Amino acid sequence: DAPKTLNLALRADRSLSALDDPGKPVAIELPGKAIGGKAAGRWFTFGVAPEHPRDQRTDDAQSICFKTEPLTEPTILLGCPWVEICLQLPPGLQRGMVTARLCAVSPSGYSTRLSFGAVNLLHRVGSHNAAYQIPSLGGRVDLSLDLNFVSVQVPEGYQILLALHTQYWPIFW
């Protein structure tokens, strides 16, 4: 079988479902206190267990999360995932960050980080001319957020979770 691209859409009920599912686009409010990173682990590791990301449930609780239904078959994720979203910024916000984590959630609830990425709103189309990219006050911002490479098989019965944050301390801030 040829590999397929897994395209998922965010839904108003905080689910992730197939992009070709009928459904209206959803507006997501990303509050300034949607922080994560306490379970992030270290930025640069040497393979020692305490340096790696821990169970992500504490960060999931501080995030805006979207989950698939439990997988009906093992699913291979391979490549560089990305998230495309349109944010409605609150009035007065001129700078900020959006981070995303892709996790696999076991039937027992244990959440394993598979990939993550971040974008600084001032540098959303590149760092070469950040001064000219300041979002308009209360304006809409289209973002394409690249996540790190992933190569994993998510078992049957697990759910895929996408968590969005405005910080990911101490890795991004």
Image (cartoon, helix red, strand yellow):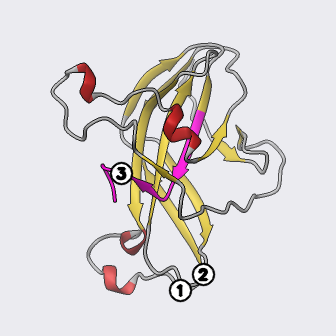
What is the spatial separation of the Cα atoms under label 1 and label 2, in whole angstroms? 5 Å
Please tell me whether mark 3 sits on a helix, a strand or a loop.
loop
Question: Is disc 1 surrounded by few (<14), some (14 to 19) or many (20+) residues within 10 Å?
Answer: some
The quadrant the N terminus occupies is top right
The quadrant the C terminus occupies is bottom left
Question: Is disc 2 surrounded by few (<14), some (14 to 19) or many (20+) residues within 10 Å?
Answer: some
Residue 80 as seen in the image, left or right of residue 44: right
94 w.r.t. 69: above or below: below
The x and y percentages for residue 50 are 26, 24
The x and y percentages for residue 83 are 53, 51
Q: Quadrant of residue 122?
A: bottom left
Badge 2 or badge 3: first in the primary sequence: 2
Say which residue label 1 marks.
136
Say which residue label 2 marks.
139
**Which tag is nearer the camera, tag 2 or tag 3?**
3
Is residue 36 shown to the viewer in this render? yes
Say which residue label 3 marks.
169
Please tell me whether mark 1 sits on a helix, a strand or a loop.
loop
- Magenta stretch encompasses residue 164: yes
Q: Say which amino acid is labelled 2.
A: Gly
Q: Nearer the viewer, residue 147 or 96?
A: 96
165 w.r.t. 110: above or below: below
Q: Residue at x 46, y 81 (%)?
A: 94
Badge 1 or badge 3: first in the primary sequence: 1
Residue 60 as seen in the image, left or right of residue 16: left
The x and y percentages for residue 120 are 38, 66
Numbered range of the magenta stretch: 161-173
Instruction: Give the numbered dot on residue 152.
Output: none
